[in-house]
Amino acid sequence: MSENIEGTISLDGLLEGRFAGESFTADDLRRWASRAADRHLHFSVEVEGNSFSVLGERHRVKAGDVGDDPARTVAEALDALLDRMPPPTRTGAMSTLRSVEYRKGEEVQTLYVIVGGKVDVRQRTVEAKTTAPVGPLTRKEKVRMALMGLGVALLVFLASSIFVDYRAIYTNIVEAVVPVSADELVVEPGPFGDSFSVTKKEVVSVSGGGQAIVLTLKRSEAFPVTAEQAQKLYDDANDLPTRLATESLFRGYVRCEYFDKEGKFLTVAPARVIELHKVETLEIALPLPAKGPRVAKVVFTY
């Protein structure tokens, strides 16, 4: 494919010289190159000892962005650089910089040589096989491309849906963004149902990010407040779960297991309930996992 795109220009070659004193430095060269880039003229600066080179980078840009007369713009930029140089550096500078601009059916070749410390522009125009630039898409073409893209995306979606559970992905994204609601959470006292009940539940934000569920527990008359009551309840138990639950209450620590909406176990958190030996109601805070599936149920266990 032809690269001779009409209405474009590129640079090549280099300008080289030597530093003389400290009035002109590599930083001055780099600042000049930065200003030139603002005018869509791209140069790279190389420094080795007291010698420097300014290379024209072969970036093809729109000639109109450089100026109405791109060659004159290049020459003005180079003259500005030479004017910044002290006389010894300016008179010793040499240039093989050149530009190539493509117009319809022709190539404009420009050479920028240095004569007497000034830029001398030498130019010629030759016939060339050029290619018209791609014009902006029409509204009809944009609509057609959008419809084609939508069709391809739909085909990819249908084909990949065999292997990818998009519904689960969507659900996980929504659950990660939408805060947990206390009304959504099911809390079960489990084997401690005869000893205390959950009278209130609330989801709160915690410092540092994340959420926690605050539960209000109310003990019943069956709650073993004293060691004697716990011993009697333990001795009268006819099964191991009741004995383990009694032991947990007397120690004052129970476990809370988390499950998702499908009933899958997620994690476990300890809860300190020893204060129920002294007070009738107690608030406990259980942290909710920051990542992973949303917690749907909390079950107390020993």
Image (cartoon, rainbow, N blue to C red):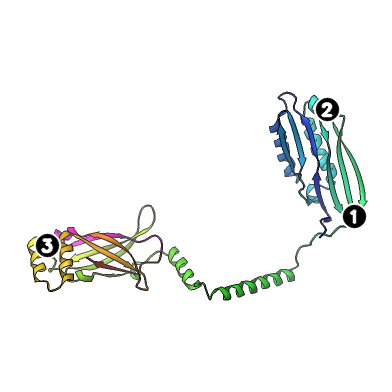
- The residue beneath circle 1 is 128
Q: Is residue 43 above or below residue 236?
A: above
Q: Is residue 185 magenta?
A: no
* Dot 2 and dot 3 residues touching (CB under 8 Å): no
Which element carries disc 1, helix, strand or loop?
A: loop
Name the residue located 75 percent from the left edge and 44 percent from the top edge: 42
Magenta span covers which residues? 272-292
Name the residue located 85 percent from the left edge and 52 percent from the top edge: 102
Q: Residue furthest top?
A: 21
User: Amino acid type of disc 1?
Assistant: Ala
Task: Return the x and y of residue 71 as percentages of the image width and height.
Answer: 85, 44
Task: Return the x and y of residue 59 as percentages of the image width and height.
Answer: 76, 49
Q: Nearer the viewer, mark 2 or mark 3?
A: 2
- The residue beneath circle 2 is 91
How many angstroms separate mark 1 from mark 3 (CA)? 101 Å
- The residue beneath circle 3 is 225
Which quadrant holds the C terminus? bottom left
How many angstroms separate mark 2 from mark 1 (CA)? 36 Å
Task: Return the x and y of residue 144 as percentages of the image width and height.
Answer: 71, 72
